Amino acid sequence: MAPNFQMICKISLMSGGFKQNEILSKKVNTIYELMKKQLSKQTHYDFGMRAIKSVLNASARLKREMGDMDEITVMIKAIRDMNLPKFVAEDVILFDNLFIDLFPDCEEPENDNDALQIEIEEALMRHNLQLNENLVVKIMQLYESNVTRHGNMLVGLTMSGKTTAW
């Protein structure tokens, strides 16, 4: 017997204080089904209940921290923050397209990470490293992952910047 992910999502969202729990549970369930089917198969991808529960917990935390933010925007931020760091480059484009289809009139919330980005860029220059935009983005994503997750794993080819990012 398979678990009813949509019902689990709805109950978790209700317990997190979401008023639009019915709509959001459908969207969360749908996007995870689509990611499972359409994104490339990577060993570090997980689109099962554990990943969904992580997003639901993150969304509840964000809702508590940003009570004035729209619930759909909170969910968008949680889904993006919990998934983008683990995607390979070609899957980011597919993920963005899935997002546009599922949340057509919603914009991605802005992250106020300007100070962090400036510090990362200065640190790279101080260590005589190339200022690569993709590396800066991945370092910022790693920082966000460290804040929101209990454990992290850096995956990539040799000389792809894992040690530098860490």
Image (tube, rainbow, N blue to C red):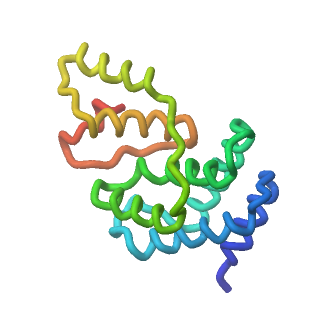
Between residue 1 and residue 115, name the one nearer to us.
115
Residue 15: % across, % down:
81, 56
Residue under the point 30% across and 22% down: 121
Residue under the point 41% across and 34% down: 140
Residue 129: % across, % down:
19, 23
Between residue 1 and residue 13, name the one nearer to us.
13
Location of the C terminus by quadrant is: top left
Residue 73: % across, % down:
61, 50
Location of the N terminus by quadrant is: bottom right
Is 37 above or below relative to 80?
below
Residue 71: % across, % down:
69, 52
Q: Which corner quadrant of the image does residue 53 belong to?
A: bottom right
Residue 84 falls left or right of residue 89: right
Residue under the point 73% across and 39% down: 68
> Residue furthest toward the front?
105
Residue 142 falls left or right of residue 10: left
> Residue furthest toward the bottom?
1
Q: Which corner quadrant of the image does residue 109 belong to?
A: top right
Is 29 above or below relative to 141?
below
Between residue 87 and residue 103, name the one nearer to us.
103
Residue 11 falls left or right of residue 162: right
Residue under the point 51% across and 63% down: 104
